[in-house]
């Protein structure tokens, strides 16, 4: 219910004269009186004396500096200021109740099934290494880890959380940013020893290129030709999984373009070598955890999101 301008001015003037110091108990009594329609009914529902309820209302009106309820021995009705105050009092009490409920959930050990979906490479390199720790912290959560190389329908696949890279387009989902990834062109030292090191875009035509079977956009490598355009490669050997492509690259089967979270350990150990770093587009691809919209998250989902976000700080690139 909106407050007429005259009533708003009166309430604003009252606030300037006397700062509001209402308590949650004041708000509870006021809302209960309005909703029950009488002081007697409120005294019974809250376990207070009728005189205590009446005093609480009077003190609240003193604090806000405005009459909220016109009361007689037979009836009562809200003033314009009271109607304005009621809307906000209800919202404040609802938020307080929600906060207490969330705190209770955090203190209670979460239980139940939690279904998580991600591309196989992300699951293996970014999530699986932390699962032991998560299960130790939350033994009551039954995890189901599923992999899919394409974006899934969370409802159709009975999935609670999905990890997605790149721009998001589904407005029915909520998203928690986890960080970002960067693509790198790599090959094994053995492959380079037998076939040479490509130093420019034109050199790629003479090499065995490893790419994806399903998504054409995943075969647009972030290296620029002389016109500054991304290079669309045609793989001579393709796979649906990034992890399969990584294993093929490690086996010396060709040149691949893979995310840094997959290749960092291999590069550090000398199993893979970065190629054409000076030609790479350094743009970042955001990584999000997505889940269904809702007023309140399941405690299982909240626990996992908080946990995995903190653990991925050293795996993904922080988003500014």
Image (cartoon, grey):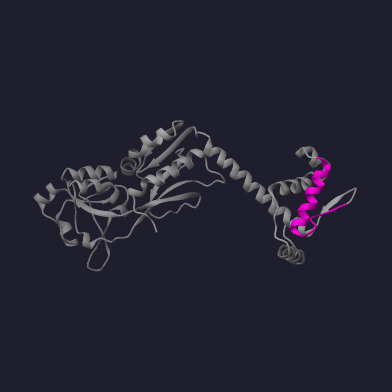
Q: Provide residue 239's location: percent of width, then percent of height.
A: 26, 44
- What residue is shown at x 12% (from left), y 47% (from top)? 190
Answer whether residue 232 is visible to the viewer in this image: yes
Q: In front here: 280 or 269? A: 269
Which corner quadrant holds the N terminus? Answer: bottom right
Locate residue 314, reporting x and y percent: 33, 48
**Could you tell me which residue is drawn at 66 percent across and 51 percent down?**
91
Asked whether 60 falls inside the magenta stretch, the response is yes
Please state the horizontal and vertical placement of residue 208, each as a whole percent of the image. Answer: 17, 51
Determine whether, in the image, residue 208 is placed left or right of residue 131: left
What secondary structure predominates along the stretch shown in magenta?
Answer: helix
On the rendered image, what quadrant is the C terminus found in? bottom left
Q: Is residue 288 magenta?
A: no
**Relative image position of residue 124 (x, y in whole percent):** 31, 40
Q: Residue at x 21, y 48 (%)?
A: 268
Q: Residue at x 15, y 60 (%)?
A: 199
- Magenta span of residues: 49-71
Quarter where residue 66 is shown? bottom right
């Amino acid at each position: 219910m909106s407050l007429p301008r005259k009533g708003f001015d009166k309430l604003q003037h009252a606030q300037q004269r006397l700062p509001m110091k209402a308590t949650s108990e004041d708000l509870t009594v006021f809302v209960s009186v309005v909703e029950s329609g009488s002081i007697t009914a409120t005294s019974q529902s809250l376990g207070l004396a009728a005189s205590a309820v009446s005093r609480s209302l009077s003190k609240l009106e003193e604090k806000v500096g405005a009459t909220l309820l016109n009361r007689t021995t037979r009836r009562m009705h809200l003033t314009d200021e009271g109607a304005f105050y009621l809307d906000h009092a209800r919202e404040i009490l609802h938020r307080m109740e929600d906060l207490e409920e969330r705190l209770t959930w955090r203190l209670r050990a979460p239980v139940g099934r939690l279904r998580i979906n991600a591309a196989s490479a992300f699951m293996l390199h970014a999530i699986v290494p932390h699962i032991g720790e998560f299960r130790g912290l939350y033994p009551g959560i039954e995890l189901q880890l599923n992999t899919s190389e394409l974006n899934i329908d969370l409802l159709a696949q009975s999935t609670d959380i999905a990890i997605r890279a790149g721009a998001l387009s589904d407005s029915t989902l909520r998203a928690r940013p986890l960080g970002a990834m960067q693509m790198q062109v790599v090959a094994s030292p053995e492959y380079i020893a037998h076939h040479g090191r490509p130093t420019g875009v034109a050199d790629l035509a003479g090499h065995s290129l490893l790419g994806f079977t399903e998504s054409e956009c995943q075969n647009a490598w972030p290296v620029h030709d002389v016109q500054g355009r991304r290079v669309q490669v045609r793989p001579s050997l393709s796979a649906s999984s990034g992890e399969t492509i990584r294993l093929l690259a490690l086996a010396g089967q060709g040149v691949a373009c893979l995310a840094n979270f997959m290749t960092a350990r291999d590069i550090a150990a000398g199993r893979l070598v970065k190629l054409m770093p000076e030609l790479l587009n350094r743009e970042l691809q955001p990584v999000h955890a997505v889940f269904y919209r809702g007023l309140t998250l399941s405690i299982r989902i909240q626990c996992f999101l908080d946990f995995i976000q903190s653990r991925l700080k050293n795996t993904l690139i922080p988003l500014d």
